[in-house]
Amino acid sequence: MLRTVLVANRGEIARRVFRACRQLGMRTVAVYSEADREAFHVREADEAVAIGGAPARESYLNSDRILEAARQARADAIHPGYGFLSENWRFAKAVQDAGIVFIGPKPDAIRRMGDKIEARRLMAAARVPILPGSLTPVANAAEARRAADEVGFPIILKAAVGGGGIGMARVGQEAELQSAFTTAARRAQGAFGSGELYVERYLERPRHVEVQVFGDDSGEVVHLHERECSIQRRHQKLVEESPAPNLPAASKAALTSTAVAGARAIGYTNAGTMEFLVDESGRFYFLEMNTRLQVEHPITEEATGLDLVVAQLRVGSGEPLPWRQSEIVQSRAAVECRVYAEDPTKGFLPSPGTVSKLALPSGRGIRIESGIEAGSTVSVHYDPLLLKLVTHAATRAQAVQRMADALDACVIEGVRTTVPFLRRVITSDEFRQGRVHTQMVEQGAFNA
């Protein structure tokens, strides 16, 4: 069993991993930037090590400083959380080369699935359905047009390396292609160091449904059922739930078995997520694989009663999976709202500042994962996620109503937040009836 775990992250996910470590009797190490010197997660760890300046590139994205912090703290494992270096295969390999356990998949799996074009080829070879499109990068707008001629407009241009919606551009007709290609390539180059793009058919009004998978070193792979993630803006998720509403049993069975087959085909270990788009006819297509713990993992935990982070630490220690597939049952319904310091009335612009007042709901069926407290500073340097509000109940209707009540009880002052917007989503007829798709926010379905 591991003894000391450094979390190469900040905020609520660092605190979440610390909680799992304490449950297993492991010592915890926080890292922090100059901006986070007084942060909640820093005070909560057994030890904290400074790693550099406020900009992420000087601290949370600086692998050398994180490795030095791990050596200084004598950590025998590093958990990357999500974001930052969590899907950087070079970092994972450097951790392993330093004789430290990386709590996540093998570097080669991260590398292969992080290259979106290679991931498409691998999944196609494993008979996982993929969207029609290019299986090689398109060098320029002319090549993109030839690919578009094969799959038909509308198309979407995507960054071959990276994710999070960066470098994506919908192209509805040929006249838009040159401008969209130039913009997408520039953004991809700036974010990921590579401007390579590929083409996929663009689905109108699809659902975004993902499957949590988990593997161990023996080659065993299981799924922990599905999550609905269709409420999103600019390809960033805002509301998630499990089980997915209005998903026929046959579709669910096909999705979960396909996800396991895809993960098994690449020898996947530890926690990961296979993401799919589901069209209006019920056909589904591989979107990407997130080779890390997901932001929305709490809804899977609440729906199944299992602890994914404890399992990550156990499997990272070399233990086998703690569950058999037959033991993994969705016994409850769970909903998660991501509360950001953003202003929905201004296109979700970040709202940095100081949280002057904070009062959050509590009680039966409510779970909060938070990295803030009254007096916390919301920095311009990092993602403005403040907290995740999770509710669960015996039925979806009860979990949704519990979420509506919980949002009503949230008081966050000093920064603008997405709470009012989330209230409109949760109380809308479309959401209550489970009639959701990925373009609802952009189409103004939840405008005031």
Image: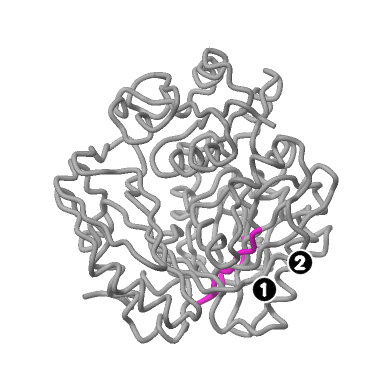
| Residue numbers of the magenta segment | 200-212
Residue 127: name its quadrant.
bottom right
**Amino acid type of disc 1?**
Phe
Rate crowding at label 1 as few (under 14), some (14 to 19) or many (20 or more) other CA atoms within 10 Å: many
The residue that appears at 57% across and 29% down in the rendered structure is 5
Residue 101: name its quadrant.
top right
Residue matched to label 1: 284
The residue that appears at 35% across and 52% down in the rendered structure is 387
**Amino acid type of disc 2?**
Thr
Find out whether the residues at labels 1 and 2 contact each other: C-beta distance under 8 Å: yes
Sequence-wise first label, 1 or 2: 2
**Residue 258 numbered tag:** 2
Is residue 205 covered in magenta? Answer: yes
Q: Position of residue 149 (x, y in %)?
A: 64, 68
Whether residue 325 sits left or right of residue 198 in the image: it is right
Element at label 2 = helix
Q: How is the image coloured?
A: one colour
